Image (cartoon, rainbow, N blue to C red):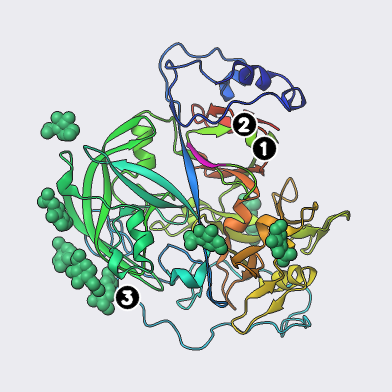
Amino acid sequence: MLPNIAVCVLLSAAACHGATIPLPAYGAHQDGAAPRPAVGSDLVGAAPPPTKKPGYVRLPVSRHYFNGSSGWKWGWHWSPPPGFPSGPLGGPGGGPGGGQNGPIPGPWPTGSPFQPTIPGWPPIPGQTGFPSPPSFSPWPDQTDRRWGWQHLEDLGGIAYILQLDIGTPPQKIKVFIDTGSYELWVNPRCNTSADATLCQSYGNYFPNKSNSSSFVGGDFAVTYGTGAVKGSYWSDIMSIAMFQIPAVQFAVANDSNYTFSGILGLGYSYPYSINYPSVLDLMVSQKLISAPIFSLGLGGDQDGFSEIIFGGINRWKFAGPLEPVAIWPPISQQDPNWIQYWVNVTSVGMTKSGQAPVIYTPRDTFTMPTLIDTGSTLSYIREDLVAQIGQQFQATVDAAGNYIVDCAWRNNTGPGTVDFGFNRGRMVISVRYKDFVYQQYPGHCMLGVQPADVGSTNYVLGDTFIRGAYLVFDQQSDVVWMNQYYNCGDGVVSVGQTTRDTQYVVGAC
Ligand SMILES: *[C@@H]1O[C@H](CO)[C@@H](O)[C@H](O)[C@H]1NC(C)=O
Ligand SMILES: *[C@@H]1O[C@H](CO)[C@@H](O)[C@H](O)[C@H]1NC(C)=O
Ligand SMILES: *[C@@H]1O[C@H](CO)[C@@H](O)[C@H](O)[C@H]1NC(C)=O
Ligand SMILES: *[C@@H]1O[C@H](CO)[C@@H](O)[C@H](O)[C@H]1NC(C)=O
Ligand SMILES: *[C@@H]1O[C@H](CO)[C@@H](O)[C@H](O)[C@H]1NC(C)=O
Ligand SMILES: *[C@@H]1O[C@H](CO)[C@@H](O)[C@H](O)[C@H]1NC(C)=O
Ligand SMILES: *[C@@H]1O[C@H](CO)[C@@H](O)[C@H](O)[C@H]1NC(C)=O
Ligand SMILES: *[C@@H]1O[C@H](CO)[C@@H](O)[C@H](O)[C@H]1NC(C)=O
């Protein structure tokens, strides 16, 4: 930790701009172990507490690039399909942990459930201007095309991966980070996965090779649009950064199809969808962090490393204060078995190189409840908005309804951006074309937003949005704090010691 970090907190952001920055030092920090970085309470004058208090746990996130080869498949997503029955606490399967058990949905629908807008951009039938937003109903549509694991060669893309050490001695497992689900599971069956080699490279956990494992039992089952996982629960020591969490419960799969990686779900978990504490909950109860809060700075291809910080915020990844965007519908109004990070998007627009920003949505009335989900490669919003953006990129719509664009947009190094507004314009996240246009495979690129299914309100801001933002997922205050992502250095402060102390953290860029 550079001494100048604490000083910078007290000076204006401008004074800190351009300060010499150390290389990222991954690992964990706990107060008392090293000079304590400034936290929110410092900023309002409180003296640093003398006792050892929770700090933060920081981990690098590796980006794994997949090469796609065919032109029509969707991105992928690792949550259960929409409309999938969710049961009472504990899960309908009766296991201690539950999960979305239930009957496997019917086969993938034949024919496209989606009628694309043909090039030339006629208005959507029956639609003049902007319709009032449909009523909010999560997951009404069994045929949602986003869900499931596809053959890797078909999808391409980028996954964000975290390494965990489980057991004694530690076994190294790589898992996908997913804010759209809420459980940790490991051990996809590689010989029936979409990519056996890749699957094996992510590692497997063998309870019988750990002298600290214990069998919990119960049924774990998740069914995806394509693919499924079954297994049972185990408990073992997990090392995360420099810390050990003694008894982490997680699911160990013994049967799966298509899936090629385990998943670390970081959504709301205990006591909503599961009746045991999640990894995030255990970090709090083990006093590694103060509150169930984590920050994600994925950044774009050219932004250097990606990272996740539990209980802390990297001030050198944004400028100024973070905007609190309330989770909506409120937790109390969501399905208690599946609480997710939904927020209102209040504007969608673009800023073309050298031009003034244009907003495609009614300035004072537009709201679009949208899920923020690292497990989704692409973003999915209303088709009329996708069409407006697509027109600016001279997109064509393929037979499956994808908006296809020239990959040259990714080479556009000018200041053009696609802009997503929150809290009535108090925060606008501008995603550079390079981060927004998604290269499925060399020479084949898709718009970073694609239409949600007809009639569906399952809007998602996936990685094509998240790359442009610094995000703090705050389960203590039911808020996602946001600001534009920049990379101007490195320096982490802890948060969560007092409710909403994130509001005092000022980005240093
Ligand atoms: C993808 O293709 C590029 C070159 O086209 C290659 O360097 C890279 O290793 C490939 N990645 C994977 C995961 O196959
Ligand atoms: C478990 O394994 C570790 C490392 O191999 C060893 O240090 C430890 O003593 C073992 N514990 C027990 C209870 O066997
Ligand atoms: C995959 O491996 C499992 C056990 O390792 C084996 O039982 C199964 O038959 C294999 N499946 C295929 C399709 O090879
Ligand atoms: C551990 O279990 C795996 C299968 O789950 C088995 O293949 C392996 O032989 C077992 N190893 C030991 C040391 O028992
Ligand atoms: C997985 O474990 C369950 C419960 O132990 C067992 O009933 C099932 O046969 C196992 N499946 C496979 C493919 O090994
Ligand atoms: C995977 O597919 C096989 C063959 O279709 C099936 O028997 C098995 O139950 C499936 N596994 C899961 C977890 O759905
Ligand atoms: C989200 O939008 C709805 C209208 O669609 C509005 O009623 C609600 O107050 C908004 N929530 C927040 C937190 O702004
Ligand atoms: C983008 O730039 C790369 C390298 O600078 C080049 O290889 C590629 O052909 C360019 N793509 C397009 C579509 O212009």
**Label 3: which residue?**
104
* CB within 8 Å, label 3 to label 2: no
- Seen at 38% across and 60% down, the residue is 198
Distance between the alpha carbons at the discs numbered 2 and 1: 6 Å
Query: The disc labelled 1 sits on which kind of residue?
Result: Phe
Q: Position of residue 323 (x, y in %)?
A: 66, 41
Q: In this view of the protein, can residue 147 be seen by the observer?
A: no
Distance between the alpha carbons at the discs numbered 1 and 3: 43 Å
Left or right: 120 with respect to 405? Answer: right
**Label 2: which residue?**
315
Quarter the N terminus occupies: top right
Disc 3, ligand 6: is the CB inside 8 Å? Answer: yes
Density class for disc 1 (Cα within 10 Å; few <14, some 14-19, many ≥20) is: many
Where ligand 2 lies, by quadrant?
A: top left
Q: Given this view, does label 1 or label 3 mark the residue nearer the observer?
A: 1
Distance between the alpha carbons at the discs numbered 3 and 2: 44 Å
Left or right: 220 with respect to 349? Answer: left
